[in-house]
Amino acid sequence: MKSSIFITRKLPEAIVKSLEHHFEIKMWEEEDTPVPRSVLLKEIQDVEGIYCLLTDTIDEEVIKGAPNLKVISNMAVGFNNIDIQAAEQQGIVVTNTPGVLTETTADLTFTLLMSTARRIVEASDYLRNGNWDTWSPMLLTGQEIHGSTLGIIGLGRIGEAVAKRAKGFGMNLLYYNRTRKFEKEEEIGIQYADLDTLLKESDFVCVMIPYSPKVHHFIGKDELALMKPNAIVINTSRGGIVDEEALYESLVNKQIWGAGLDVFEEEPVSTNHPLLSLSNVVTLPHIGSASVNTRLKMAQLAADNIIHVLNDKSPLTPVNS
Ligand code: DGY
């Protein structure tokens, strides 16, 4: 008899087919919205696998509500939506999708950095709204990218890929990481700095650490206060890492110059959120990995992880083993 799995969102057909070959599938496909909690709790009762997204909260209640569960496969590299400890206690394998999204997320991070520095969204709106009367010496002037200093907080895969892009743009590079990466310093040409030094010396501060409660508001009032008045904060990691209230205050008080945000503490962010009222903030709807190819690779890797685990093979990309 085939094992059964629950998929929390409608997936591309090819991915569903590759899963159907192995499993009985139940899938939330009524709308492109997160599966309602009550449906999730009902559907997982007898499944051995859950295929989920970062929009699903897979907490202790869900995990305990699925006594046959063997694997939770998250179609994302971040897995802060899953209670890893509760999964471990039940002997459940949790997998994510690292690697396949590294370069695409780095592309978007750099796009956001450049768009914020050169006021691309504001400039485009300015033109379309009929405000362009004449060329003017200081019209829509932004910040220099080449020759400036980028401080990367978290030199993991994506941080490193961002650093390589920055190098090509003639930027100076600093990084802060829990552990120093001597070989990367040499290979990329990046210098280690303690957090305060990085915050004080960088023109761009790029947050690239995975979220956990330990790093909640890692960038808060005190950290923002150390930054330069021309500094730009870029966050494509998770919203909770930056204290949004403190960020808003520092932008309004001109303590720092701008911010580029692909992620928010609460997603989807409310259109009434104060940060969305500021022209020096570029905001995106969590699209770091959103290229067609990369999303398909993530979806397939998440599928392959379930296929492996439920066929008694080692998971390809486990987070908890
Ligand atoms: C992730 O994978 O964690 C990103 O936030 C979405 O690609």
Image (cartoon, helix red, strand yellow):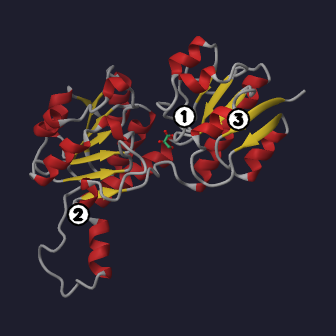
Q: Residues within 10 Å of mark 2 (few under 14, many from 20)?
A: some
Q: Residue furthest bottom?
A: 133
Residue 305 shown left or right of residue 157 in the figure: right
Q: On the rendered image, what quadrant is the N terminus found in? A: top right
Residue at 20%, 35% in the rendered image:
220
Nearer-N-terminus badge (3/1): 3
User: Which callout, 1 or 2, points at the residue further toward the start of the chain?
Assistant: 1
- The residue singled out by tag 2 in the image is 279
Q: Label 1: few (<14), some or many (≥20) within 10 Å?
A: some
- Residue 11: x %, y % from top left: 68, 49
Q: Residue at x 15, y 29 (%)?
A: 196
Eyeballing the image, is 189 above or below 125?
above
- Residue 85 vs residue 43: left or right? left
The residue where tag 3 is placed is 43
**Badge 2 amino acid:** Ser
How far across and down, in percent of the image, does residue 41 sit? 64, 32
Q: Which numbered mark, 2 or 3, is in the foreground of this view?
A: 3
Looking at the image, residue 275 lies above or below residue 142: above
- Residue at numbered disc 1: 98
Q: Quadrant of the C terminus?
A: top right
Q: Which mark is residue 49?
A: none
* Amino acid at circle 1: Pro
Relative side of 6 to 235, left or right: right
